[in-house]
Image: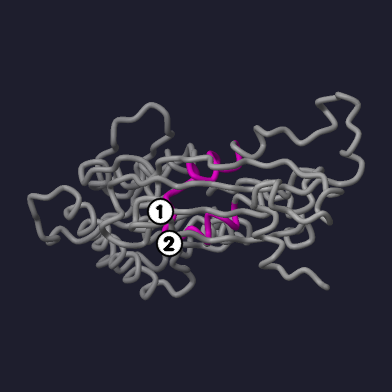
Amino acid sequence: MTETTEQKIHGGLGHPDDRSATDITRNRISLRDHVVRVEIGAFQQERNQTQRLRFNLVVDLPPECEKPDDDVDRILSYDVLTDAISQELSAERLNLLETLAERIARRILQEPQAQQVILRIEKLDRGSGALGVEILRQKADVPATGKTATVPERIIWLPFAALQAAALPDAVNGWVRQTPASVICVAGPPSTPAVPDPAVQLRLDLLAAEQAAWVLAALCPDLGVISSRTEMDWAMKSASPSVWAPSKIVLDSLQEVSPEMIAGPRLGVWLARFLAVKNLAVVGEALPKVTDINVVRLKLADLAG
């Protein structure tokens, strides 16, 4: 009888005493009942607070790992499993367990010895029971990509008033010619409502900046609007000029962010630090006082050059 994917998952994650005799020849390593407290979830009540996640995973190994001759270099270290979890949890705030599971499995399967991953992730604090997802992924499901981090050559910050300037389209065209692998960020309008709650104010300020980004994209059709790290990576690799809609990256960054930290040109500073970009151009405003980034002040005419 052919074993179904569901049977493979539940058999793989079950206790060794519960497995069928056909599983005895399979060489595996496992991590059981690994609990981490983290902020995750798509609902508003899951933001700004942590909850417990429980991880159970099993990794199938190739036949050559059956006799490692007590050589630690020939086996898959247990640290690979816990490191994959911690690295993906620390990369950015996620909404879905499904996304987290896919990324952990992909990271583990990049190891030469890992042939198959069976992974279960459960939320322990969202009800009377454990709510979770289970996946099975094989090495063939995750082809090697040789992915490397891609960052912009520079970031250009524009004040909202620049959107009214007749010289703006020419300036953007000049920017595209000079350094296409760059990102523009735009301040929101000064009329953003003010509220006493910093978390709400942060969202209002980010939404205002997003509106400004879409206005700029409408004025300069060659600019694409990017909101996620994946979109940014693609834009940089393809040298596509882009304007940044900041809400997703800022709110999912795992960093504590206040409205003051993204006010004015500091929005460009925040993005430069987040992406480890060393060059920031500030148009028409006083320069922020920073020592870890090369900040220059420009006029729109300078960008058009």
Say what amino acid the circle numbered 2 marks. Answer: Ser
Q: Position of residue 33 (x, y in %)?
A: 54, 42
N-terminal-most mark, 1 or 2: 2
Q: Is residue 284 visible?
A: yes
Looking at the image, which is closer to me, 299 or 53? 53
Marker disc for residue 227: 2
**21 in magenta:** no
Left or right: residue 275 versus residue 82 is left
Say what amino acid the circle numbered 1 marks. Answer: Ile
* Secondary element at image label 1: helix
In the displayed structure, would residue 19 be above or below residue 82?
below
* Callout 1 crowding tier (Cα within 10 Å): few <14, some 14–19, many ≥20: some
Left or right: residue 59 versus residue 187 is right
* Secondary element at image label 2: loop
Residue appearing at x 45%, y 40% in the figure: 36
Q: Which residue is mark 1?
A: 249
